[in-house]
C-alpha cells in the first residue's frame, strides 16, 4: 500500500492560486458544470455511495447530511464552511486553503446547489487572517466569471459567498457558537434543539461542513473511474488528510489511504522521533482527542481500528510526544488550554475544568488519593454527558484515556494518604 496518495491534493502545485483562468486550465469548475445537470438528490446519492464521513471530527455521513439539508423546505437556506480549525495540532485545512482555494469555492457552490441554498459563508479563524486576500480574490474572480451571483450557468440558480473572520476563540469551532459569532454575538454555543439544519444562521436552515469535507465534493463528482473507492480498507473508504506534529523529525500534512498503520505515519512519513527517543504518548484528533501509548503503532489508521484501540480519527491530527515530557505535564498543559478556551456558559464544563486542574496538581504533588481518582472519573463522566457543547464533552478525553492507558501513573503509592 502506498504511503501517500493525491486525490484531494491532486491540484496542489498545478495552478496559480491567484488566477481562476489557471484553475480552469486544470479542470476547474468542470465539477460544477456536471453538478447542474444533476438533481440535488442525485448529488447527495453520489456522495453517499462514496461513503464519505465528515472530516470535522464527528465523522457524520456526508451524503446523509446533504440529503437531510436538501429535504428541509424553506425559502432561504445557508451553507457554511467551517474554516476555524482551532484544534491544536490540526493544520490540514490550512493546506487546502493555501494550495487550492478555487476548489473550495467551487465545492461550496455545488453544495449550495445541492441543498437549494442561496448564501454561503466561510468562517475563517483569526490566525489565518493572511489567507483573507487569497479567498476574497477567489470569490471576486468566481463572481466575475459567472460562477457566483444570479442565474449561475443559466440554471436559474443564485448563490453568493461571504467571508467572515473569527476572533480566536476555540469554542467557535462548534457549529452553533460559530453561527452566533457570524451574527455578531458572543461566540457561545446554543441550546439544542432546534438544530441548525432547521434553524441556524439568522434562523435559516443551515448546512455546516469543514474545509476538507467540502473540498472533497468536486473531486468525487469528477471521479468517473471510482478511484476514491480503491483506497482504504473495511468501512473506512478513501483517503484522509492528516496533520502530524510534536517530537517528530518531519512534521507536516499528508494524504494517506485509510489503512496505513500509525507506525508508517510516524516513522516513514514524519521521519521518526527527534534523536530517536522513545515515544511517551500519542494523541489523536487534537487536544480534545484521546491518547495512547506506543502499543498503538501497528494499528491501521481507520475509523474502526482506532476506535477499537480507544482513540478516534477526530480532526485528523496526530501529536507525538517523546520521553522528555511527562504524562502529568502533558495533561496539565492540555487542561490549561481548555480552561482558557471554555466560554464558562455551562456548569459542567466551567466547574469540571476547575476540578481537573486541582486533581492534576495533586497528581503532580503526589498527594492524590483513591477518593480523588473516583471523584475525577465521576466528574469527567458528568462533563461528557451534560456539557452544552463539544468543548466540555471532550475536555476530559485526554485525562480519562490516560487513566485507562497509564494506570501506573495514577497509582496511589502510600496508604498514609488514603481518606
Image (cartoon, rainbow, N blue to C red):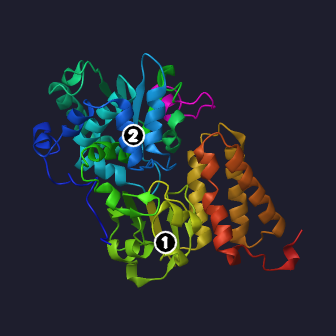
In the displayed image of the protein, which residue is found farthest to the top? 75
Instruction: Answer above or below: position of 92 versus 297.
Output: above
Q: Secondary structure at mark 2?
A: helix
Left/right placement of residue 99 relative to residue 239 reads left
Pair 2/1: label in front: 2
Cα gap from disc 2 to disc 1, whole angstroms? 41 Å
Q: Are the two marked residues, 2 and 1, in contact with CB atoms closer than 8 angstroms?
A: no
Judging depth in this view, the residue of 88 and 300 nearest the camera is 300
Instruction: Locate residue 259, reporting x and y percent.
Output: 41, 67
Could you classify mark 2 by the number of other residues whose Cα lies within 10 Å: few (under 14), some (14-19), or many (20 or more)?
some
The N terminus: image quadrant: bottom left
Residue 211 relative to residue 170: left or right: left
Residue closest to the far right: 419
Vertical relation: 34 (above or below) 265: above
**Residue 163 can be seen, yes or no:** no
Image position, residue 209 (x, y; %): 42, 40
- At 62% from the left and 58% from the top, the residue drawn is 397
- Where is mark 2, residue-wise? 45
**Would you say residue 377 sits in the magenta stretch?**
no
User: As rendered, which of 294 and 416 lies closer to the eye?
Assistant: 294
Q: Residue at x 40, y 33 (%)?
A: 80
| Quarter location, residue 358 | bottom right
The image position of residue 213, as x and y in percent, is 38, 45
Q: Is residue 194 magenta?
A: yes
The answer to whether one can see residue 110 in this image is: yes
Q: Which mark is residue 321?
A: 1
Identify which residue, 105 or 94, lies in the foreground. 105
Q: Which residues are magenta?
A: 178-196
Amino acid at each position: 500500500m502506498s504511503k501517500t496518495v493525491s486525490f484531494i491534493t491532486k491540484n496542489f502545485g498545478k495552478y496559480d492560486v491567484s488566477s481562476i483562468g489557471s484553475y480552469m486550465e486544470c479542470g476547474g469548475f468542470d465539477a460544477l458544470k456536471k453538478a447542474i445537470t444533476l438533481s440535488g438528490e442525485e448529488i447527495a446519492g453520489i456522495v453517499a455511495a462514496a461513503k464519505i464521513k465528515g472530516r470535522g471530527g464527528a465523522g457524520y455521513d456526508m451524503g446523509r447530511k446533504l440529503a437531510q439539508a436538501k429535504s428541509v423546505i424553506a425559502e432561504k437556506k445557508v451553507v457554511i464552511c467551517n474554516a476555524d480549525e482551532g484544534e491544536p495540532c490540526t493544520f490540514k485545512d490550512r493546506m487546502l486553503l493555501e494550495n487550492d482555494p478555487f476548489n473550495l469555492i467551487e465545492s461550496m457552490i455545488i453544495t449550495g446547489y445541492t441543498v437549494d441554498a442561496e448564501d454561503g459563508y466561510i468562517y475563517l479563524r483569526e490566525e489565518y487572517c493572511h489567507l483573507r486576500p487569497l479567498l476574497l480574490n477567489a470569490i471576486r474572480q468566481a463572481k466575475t466569471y459567472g460562477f457566483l451571483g444570479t442565474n449561475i450557468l443559466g440554471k436559474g440558480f443564485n448563490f453568493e459567498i461571504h467571508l467572515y473572520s473569527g476572533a480566536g476563540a476555540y469554542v467557535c469551532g462548534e457549529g452553533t457558537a460559530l453561527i452566533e459569532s457570524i451574527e455578531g454575538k458572543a461566540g457561545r454555543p446554543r441550546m439544542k434543539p432546534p438544530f441548525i439544519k432547521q434553524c441556524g444562521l439568522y434562523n435559516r436552515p443551515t448546512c455546516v461542513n469543514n474545509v476538507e469535507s467540502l473540498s472533497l465534493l468536486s473531486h468525487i463528482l469528477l471521479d468517473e473511474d471510482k478511484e476514491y473507492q480503491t483506497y482504504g480498507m473495511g468501512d473506512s473508504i478513501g483517503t484522509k488528510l492528516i496533520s502530524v506534529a510534536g517530537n517528530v523529525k518531519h512534521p507536516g500534512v499528508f494524504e494517506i489511504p485509510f489503512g496505513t498503520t500509525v507506525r508508517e505515519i510516524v516513522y516513514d512519513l514524519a521521519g521518526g522521533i527527534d534523536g530517536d527517543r522513545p515515544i511517551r504518548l500519542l494523541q489523536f484528533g487534537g487536544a480534545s482527542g484521546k491518547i495512547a501509548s506506543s502499543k498503538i503503532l501497528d494499528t491501521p489508521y481507520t475509523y474502526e481500528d482506532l476506535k477499537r484501540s480507544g482513540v478516534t480519527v477526530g480532526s485528523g491530527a496526530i501529536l507525538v510526544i517523546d520521553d522528555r515530557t511527562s504524562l502529568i505535564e502533558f495533561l496539565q498543559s492540555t487542561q490549561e488550554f481548555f480552561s482558557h478556551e471554555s466560554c464558562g456558559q455551562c456548569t459542567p464544563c466551567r466547574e469540571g475544568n476547575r476540578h481537573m486542574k486541582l486533581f492534576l496538581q495533586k497528581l503532580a504533588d503526589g498527594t492524590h488519593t483513591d477518593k480523588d481518582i473516583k471523584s475525577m472519573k465521576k466528574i469527567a463522566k458528568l462533563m461528557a454527558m451534560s456539557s452544552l457543547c463539544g468543548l466540555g464533552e471532550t475536555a476530559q478525553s485526554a485525562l480519562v484515556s490516560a487513566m485507562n492507558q497509564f494506570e501506573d501513573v495514577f497509582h496511589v503509592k502510600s496508604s498514609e494518604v488514603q481518606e
